[in-house]
Image: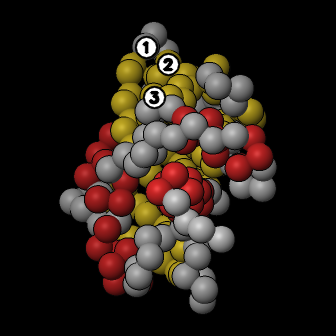
Amino acid sequence: MVVTPARRSHMAAALAITGLLVLSGCLTADSTMQADGSGTMTLTYPPPGGASKASETKRFTSDAVTVESLTMAADGKTATVKLKFTDATKLVSAKALRNLSITRTPGDGTEKVTIVIKPDLVVKLTPEQVKDEPPLKIKVTLPGTVREANAKAATDGATVTWTIPVGDFLANPSTEMTVTYEVKKA
């Protein structure tokens, strides 16, 4: 087979897409937020190549975020980190969470939480390219009953779960999830 510049370009694009899927797929987050904005998060994700327990602990640690535990699969393809944070809006202070932002907006007996996640690189993929990739799953338990949530979220009492297809996540510069919950009266 003769490798022409055009074929080399297509091969490079295919490898890049495969790399994006490996870097973005299999992401699950399960968080609990307290009324003061503090909370916990368990995140299962594909770590960067060459990552170690020490390097990942460092990437997830900041003044507002501490690592309670971190385990890596023997094959290095997945890791699970359990975090404790003092303020959800400061999760971005951990280098590993730099593509995440959270805002909290008080309302009349409610609070609206907006979560925005961004891929490292925006790329359009065909359904065939992502057919076997698991979606991103983001679950948050709040200190009050959920009133409404966007993006076809599933709600159950004080918990909201978003399921985001990998192709949708990678095709957009950001994915916004919003939830409004009832603030318990003191």
Name the residue that disc number 3 marks.
114
Q: Viewer-proximal residue, 172 or 40?
A: 172
The secondary element bearing badge 1 is classed as loop
Asked if residue 81 is positioned above or below residue 164 in the image, the reply reads below
Mark 1 near mark 2, Cβ–Cβ under 8 Å?
A: yes
Asked if residue 49 is positioned above or below residue 185 in the image, the reply reads below
Asked if residue 33 is positioned above or below residue 184 in the image, the reply reads below
Give me the disc on residue 107.
1
The secondary element bearing badge 3 is classed as strand
Please name the residue shown 56% across and 57% down the image: 7
| Disc 3 to disc 1, C-alpha distance | 13 Å
Q: Residues within 10 Å of mark 1 (few under 14, many from 20)?
A: few
Please name the residue shown 34% across and 83% down the image: 54
Q: Residues within 10 Å of mark 3 (few under 14, many from 20)?
A: some
Name the residue that disc number 2 marks.
110
User: x%, y% of residue 172?
Assistant: 51, 32
Q: Which amino acid, by three-letter code, is at mark 3? A: Thr
Res. 88 visible in picture = no
Q: Residues within 10 Å of mark 2 (few under 14, many from 20)?
A: some
Q: Nearer the viewer, mark 3 or mark 1?
A: 3
User: x%, y% of residue 31?
Assistant: 54, 51
User: x%, y% of residue 144?
Assistant: 58, 32
| Disc 1 to disc 2, C-alpha distance | 5 Å
